[in-house]
Image (cartoon, rainbow, N blue to C red):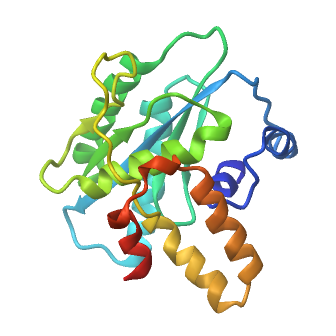
């Protein structure tokens, strides 16, 4: 529930608020702990499934992700309010990087999903981020999934932050996964809460990443 609240912007990203929220759920994080978001981007079930059967299979998929992606690492596997399945891997202070082994585990998970669950998916891995930057990592992996139209059954690792080349600037993606939640708030007349969540999402994005093209999804 802690991670679901953060990703749906129900929790403030202020460090003190995050610390208090974590304590409520029995979690303890150091200020320099880092977190890797792994988006399990479902592409296709090989058989036609009813809504009930699909929910059961996605539950099995999350259990398998806990076994193979997290393995014995600290972390969580969740389905957020937008219906996306994610693994969140903790990189504790002094524990070393998990990047290389995490990517191998994701490839194994991808193969086992095809064999055991009869489904195909692609996996998108974020760079390690501090807790207040988790929403930015979430925007990164969901935007990369939206842009991917030609490559399936792949593991997409995070870009290497040590590379010398400056990354190409792209407009920030509209938070498509959050639109349904915002629409529900609007229908319920919760305008103040809606405004708070929209503002919080904008603040989580770099200001210079926005262009006319980036605003189009909010208008149409």
Residue 164 drawn above or below residue 28: above
Query: Residue at coordinates 32% horizontally, 48% vertically from top-left?
Result: 170
Residue 135 drawn above or below residue 187: above
Query: Residue at coordinates 36% horizontally, 17% vertically from top-left?
Result: 100
Q: Is residue 130 left or right of residue 213?
A: right
Q: Is residue 29 left or right of residue 136?
A: right
Residue 194 position by quadrant: bottom right
Residue 108 position by quadrant: top left
Question: Residue 6: x, y in percent?
Answer: 67, 52
Quadrant of the snapshot with the N terminus: bottom right
Query: Residue at coordinates 32% horizontally, 17% vertically from top-left?
Result: 163
Residue 124 position by quadrant: top left
Q: Nearer the viewer, residue 44 or 142?
A: 142
Residue 71 drawn above or below residue 51: above
Question: Residue 33: x, y in percent?
Answer: 67, 23
Q: Nearer the viewer, residue 51 or 123?
A: 123
Instruction: Answer yes or no: is residue 195 visible.
Output: yes
Question: Residue 56: x, y in percent?
Answer: 45, 63
Query: Residue at coordinates 84% horizontally, 45% vertically from top-left?
Result: 17
Instruction: Answer yes or no: is residue 62 visible.
Output: no
Quadrant of the snapshot with the C terminus: bottom left
Q: Is residue 82 left or right of residue 213?
A: right
Count of labels in the image: 0
Question: Residue 40: x, y in percent?
Answer: 38, 48
């Amino acid at each position: 529930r802690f991670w679901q609240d953060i990703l749906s912007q129900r929790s403030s990203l202020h460090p003190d608020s995050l610390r208090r929220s974590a304590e409520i759920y029995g979690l303890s994080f150091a200020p320099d702990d880092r977190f890797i978001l792994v988006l399990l981007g479902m592409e296709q079930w090989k058989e036609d499934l009813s809504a009930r059967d699909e929910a059961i299979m996605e539950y099995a998929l999350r259990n398998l992700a806990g076994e193979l992606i997290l393995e014995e690492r600290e972390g969580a596997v969740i389905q957020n309010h937008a219906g996306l399945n994610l693994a969140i891997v903790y990189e504790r202070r002094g524990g070393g990087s998990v990047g290389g082994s995490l990517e191998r585990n994701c490839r194994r998970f991808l193969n086992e999903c095809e064999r055991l669950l009869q489904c195909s998916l692609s996996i998108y891995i974020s760079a390690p981020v501090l807790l207040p930057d988790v929403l930015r990592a979430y925007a990164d992996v969901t935007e990369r999934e939206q842009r991917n139209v030609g490559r399936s059954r792949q593991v997409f690792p995070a870009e290497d932050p040590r590379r010398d080349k400056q990354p190409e600037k792209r407009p920030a993606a509209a938070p498509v996964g959050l639109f349904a939640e915002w629409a529900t708030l609007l229908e319920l007349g919760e305008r103040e809460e809606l405004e708070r969540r929209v503002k919080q999402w904008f603040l989580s994005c770099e200001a210079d990443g926005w262009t006319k093209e980036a605003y189009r999804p909010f208008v149409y």
